[in-house]
Image: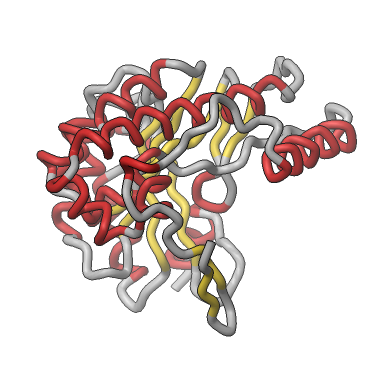
Amino acid sequence: MPHRRLSNSFWAGPCVKDWRFARWPESFLDNPWTQSLLGSMDALVTHAAGRYQVAPTLMRGPSDILAAMRGGAALVMDLMDQPEGVQLAVEEAARLWSDLAKAQLARLPRSAGGYVAGAAALRTWAPDKVLWLQEDAMALLSPKLYRRHFLAADRQLSDSFPCVAFHLHGSALWAIDDLIQLPGIDVLELNFDDARCDIEGTFAGWRKIQQHKPVVLWRMYGPDFETWLLRVLREFPAADCPSRFPLKMWVRRKGSRRCSPGRLREGIMAR
């Protein structure tokens, strides 16, 4: 498999040239990489010894898996040129995603105090075992292509596990209407990205999500951060948040550690 690297990163190149010739294993739980992941989880659970929760890894979603295997631009063309082959790949990717998710959750001991998943802004507590699902590659797709080829897989996956949180970027605001209708998605996070996202559309998206599900707000720190945060505090006051659909907010400051919303608010109010 080809790979590319920079001074601070590396990634695998496409490994599929034609979906018609792709081969999907019945199971990959005995794969050395899978065994390494599951063995790491076993070691973490043993080390934690009930003192803290161990979270499953972030596995992204079927569209991300296919985009990594084929390349984003090629995947979009394949959806037009050989949709049947891509659809089979979507179903197989969802099956393997589900198998690995189940294998991870099975390793987590029962906990009366709840469970966690994710890291950084995606850190989430749930009353039952929880997973994060995401489809970042939908930024390359039209609403029609996502709904035709990937929405059913997301519905199936989110319905298959006790608690599921979904990570969404602000480049795909149109997907909010689809995702809030999936009963298996318990939490929906919408990210206000640096990539010139629509700020008004993002605020409208956060409000729409909160009418249906718990919402997580996430954005990168920027020069307009204080103005943005004051608006969040004004338009999403804690007293007005339905107890059933609470608000969670995480902000990452570039080049530094996370700062909690409470500390950020104290800093702004002190100025």
Judging depth in this view, the residue of 184 and 140 nearest the camera is 140
In the image, residue 253 sits, relative to residue 63, either above or below, namely below
Residue 203 visible (yes or no): no
Name the residue located 73 percent from the left edge and 42 percent from the top edge: 32
Left or right of residue 153: residue 270: right
Residue 258 spot, x, y in % from top left: 57, 62
Left or right of residue 264: residue 41: right
Residue 253 visible (yes or no): yes
In the image, residue 10 sits, relative to residue 209, either above or below, namely below
Name the residue located 66 percent from the left edge and 28 percent from the top edge: 104
Judging depth in this view, the residue of 220 and 168 nearest the camera is 168
Residue 113 spot, x, y in % from top left: 69, 21
In the image, residue 264 sits, relative to residue 148, either above or below, namely below
> Which quadrant of the rendered structure holds the C terminus?
bottom left
Residue that lies at the very extreme toward the bottom in this rendered image: 7
Left or right of residue 19: residue 98: right
Judging depth in this view, the residue of 268 and 212 nearest the camera is 212
Q: Quadrant of residue 186?
A: top left
Name the residue located 29 percent from the left edge and 43 percent from the top edge: 236
Residue 70 spot, x, y in % from top left: 36, 54
Name the residue located 20 percent from the left edge and 39 percent from the top edge: 146
Q: Quadrant of residue 157?
A: top left
